[in-house]
Image: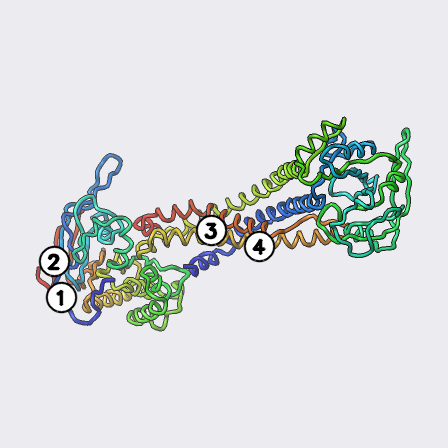
Amino acid sequence: MFDLIIRSMTQRKMRTGLTIFGIALGIFAVVVMGGMSEHMNLVVDKSLDLMADNIRIEPDGTFGGIGTLDESKVIQVKRVPGVSDAFGVLVTALDPEGGGGGFSTDMVFGVLPEKQLKDAKLTSGRYLMPGDGYKVVIGSSIARKFNLKVGDELELKSKRLQRTSSIINTRNVSVVGILEYTGSMFDSAVQMPLDSAQKFYKMENTVSFIYAKPATGADQSDLAKRIELSIDNVKSTSPEQLRKDIEGQLVIFSLITISAAVLAAVIGGLSVMNTMLMSVSERTKEFGLLKALGAERKTILLMTMGEAALMGVIGGITGIAAGSIIAYFLNKSFEAQGSALFAITPRLVIIGLLFATILGIVCGTYPAYRATKMSPMEALRYE
Amino acid sequence: MSNNGDNGNRVGECEPVLRIRNLRKTYMQGKIPVHALDDVSFDVKKGEFLSIVGPSGSGKSTLLSMIGLLDRPTEGSVFIDDVEITRAKESEAPRIRREKIGFVFQHFNLLSTLNAMENVDIAMRFTGVSKNRRKERAFELLTRVGLGDRVKHKPSELSGGQQQRVSIARALANNPAIILADEPTGAVDTKTREVIVELLKGLSEKGQTIIVVTHDMAVAEKTDRIITMRDGMIVSDMRGAGCEP
């Protein structure tokens, strides 16, 4: 049976090739777009994992951006029953001229040395220590992007608006530690002592977020609500809620990207249907003959759908391979700038292949049905 | 699989292998009924070489497609080996076709992408015969029709007569009870016609039942029996020497 399918496909090489190309193009789009979405998901997932169980407190009314909170609120948060510890973090863009916040840009985190992120391991150097002053621990992407080693200097810039002009201050800080690759936003982060950051950015007594550590056994959601009620003008988000919020935004992003890709793949699928319909009508006589020779309807169905499915599989593999190669090279080129853009996960590969196969089968069903309905009598009269 | 006996003698050949009783086929042409077959009845005995002749539209091809289960009659019955095939369900038709009938067509209907051997082999694929056995049988049949040295040739590399011989080998592949040949010499020259008719005659002499539909009286005259049809009815049934009714 398989040899007959192969023969039929190779008999019309150009048409088969074009159909496979159509599917491959669609799956290529699925893989590349999906890869982008997967990468975003992974970064957010790992970032949230690294932030552990902390409740995030930010100024009320900030949507997505970064606001400012008075550092005195840290004490207030600490006093809320159920909070075991709280600390402030100052977040600002590494390059103030290169655009604002978000996960993808390089950021500076002003943190208390004793509260810094230690779940991420170091590839070299050490973590921050109290009294470090203008010393920093950098993420792996920053190290690659600026080609930094422990002991090297990194230039920080701050920008202040004064009337119509802006004043740019610069200062060199020395790298004392480099984090290993985490796949999270911390890869693009520069961590420095909070007091030095506040001083350099002229944001004394100010933090961007406060992280509250719940006491053992405290319900995170309840505690988040309690913090919000106890302190004026703040919004607090439990890790669970934060995950939900971000995942909600990511679903929309994924939906938009994947829908565009699926549309491309469906168009590829229609080309399979078109090809198979043409093929079935050209092979009227052949199917009639096979029926006259005693072929069952299921045999004809299997032959036609098998051909469509095989085109789907080959198109799928080609699309996945092309998508992976392109993603690999784009990642390589983006890596030089410190960040990857695509993650071709096993899940994405399986989805791509399954999608291509199912697409082939679904689009081959109607032509196959037509082939089986063919009367051998009519087919054999057909010249 | 029915074995009609390729044993070289005519033992049991006087038993009817095919019985046709009161066969009718009516098509509707708009609102007007057209009787393609009108109360056709006859028997065909095992090993008989029979021709059905008649002008175009006389119903001979329709009759052939009823016997081959390619079409269903409006009324009447067709029995092959005492089994009423006209009562068979649609799902049983493929099995009956592959076990009881071998088809030979005017335009050969060989698959252009397959070589001679594969064209014979394909008829046996649906019967569950092993690949090696199919290969052996295909080679044996092609040798029998004189194409033992052409097994790897594709239809485009064979002459019309050779293609028809491949098609006869294919029809014989499953040892069918009856071979139905629809204008088997219609697309070949006179010289090749003789070869094809002699081949069919030789097979019938070895016990194979063969029914040929033809326009060509030169072909019909070589057969044991000639049934002439007109307007869907049998107008004459002439037997040569051989079995008596």
Q: Within 10 angstroms of label 1, few (less than 14), some, or many (20 or more) residues?
A: few
**What is the chain letter for disc 3?**
A
Q: Do labels 3 and 4 share a chain?
A: yes
- Image vertical order of residue B194 relative to residue A42, above or below: below
The earlier-in-sequence mark between 2 and 1 is: 1
Q: Name the residue under label 1.
A: B12
- Mark 4 and mark 1: span between their CA atoms? 62 Å
Asked whether the beta carbons under mark 3 and mark 4 sit within 8 Å of each other, the answer is: no
Q: Mark 2 points at which residue?
A: B238
Q: Which of marks 2 and 3 is in front?
A: 3
Q: What residue type is labelled 1?
A: Gly
Hey, what amino acid is under mark 3? Ala
Of the residues tagged 4 and 1, which is closer to the observer?
Answer: 4
Q: Measured from the top left, where is residue A100 in percent x and y? A: 79, 37
Number of the front mark, 4 or 2: 4
Name the secondary structure under disc 3. helix
Do badges 4 and 1 share one subunit? no
Quarter of the image with the N terminus of chain B in it: bottom left
Q: For the residue marked with disc 4, what is the amino acid?
A: Thr
Please determine if labels 4 and 2 lie on a single subunit: no
Residue A161 coordinates in the image, percent (x, y): 88, 32
Viewer-side residue, B179 vs A367 = A367
According to the image, label 4 marks what residue?
Answer: A318
Q: Return the mark for residue A308.
A: 3
